[in-house]
Amino acid sequence: MIKIFRKPAILLVTLWARRTYNQGVKAADLRHKREHKTIYLAAENFHPDRLVTYDKERFKTEKRVFGYHARLLTMNTLKRGCYYHTPDRYGNNGLSPQEKEIRRRAFIQERLRMAKLI
């Protein structure tokens, strides 16, 4: 890639990743407000560039449909590997502001890596 296009490309990918992440967080918060459960924001299985909101039931259904072994893919795996999750119904176990920022930056770095810019 030509060097003069690298910085604008990084800027565009970063802006698009922030937009995507913010939309996903808003969707997760809205769904949490409606359903009063913990909602996880993670990449979709076959389209890793898309973010999807999961709850416990959807995660278990997808695990069953795709045939993943229960001992390999648990709720703790989802909780540690997701980009964002809401608190539970009682307002406990949410992400701290530092954790939110770390996960947001990890999402942006992953998008830059997928675009082969870093």
Image (cartoon, rainbow, N blue to C red):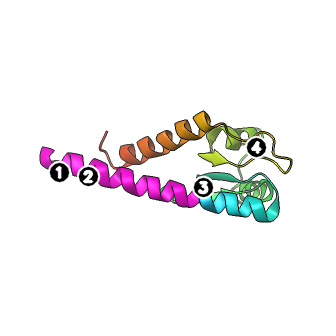
- Element carrying mark 4: helix
- Residue 4 is covered by the magenta coloring: yes
Looking at the rendered structure, the kind of residue marked 2 is Ala
Image point (78%, 44%), residue name: 70
Q: Nearer the viewer, residue 111 or 86?
A: 86
Q: Nearer the viewer, residue 87 or 68?
A: 87
User: Quick one: label 2, few (<14), some, or many (20+) residues within 10 Å?
Assistant: some
**Left or right, 45 with reference to 108:** right
Work out whether residue 46 can be spotted: no
Point out the tag, 2 or 3, that comes first from the N-terminus. 2
Looking at the rendered structure, the kind of residue marked 1 is Phe
- The percent position of residue 57, horizontal first and vertical second, equals 80, 58
Q: Which of marks 2 and 3 is in front?
A: 3
Distance from the alpha carbon under mark 1 to that under mark 4: 41 Å
- Element carrying mark 2: helix
Distance from the alpha carbon under mark 4 to that under mark 3: 19 Å
Distance from the alpha carbon under mark 2 to that under mark 3: 24 Å
Point out the tag, 1 or 4, that comes first from the N-terminus. 1
Residue bearing the label numbered 3 = 25
Residue bearing the label numbered 4 = 75
**Left or right, 34 with reference to 11:** right
- Element carrying mark 3: helix
Looking at the rendered structure, the kind of residue marked 4 is Met
Residue bearing the label numbered 1 = 5
Position of the C terminus, as image quadrant, is top left
Residue bearing the label numbered 2 = 9
Work out whether residue 80 can be spotted: yes
Region in magenta: 1-25
Looking at the rendered structure, the kind of residue marked 3 is Val
Point out the tag, 3 or 1, that comes first from the N-terminus. 1
- The percent position of residue 17, horizontal first and vertical second, equals 43, 53
Mark 2 near mark 1, Cβ–Cβ under 8 Å?
yes
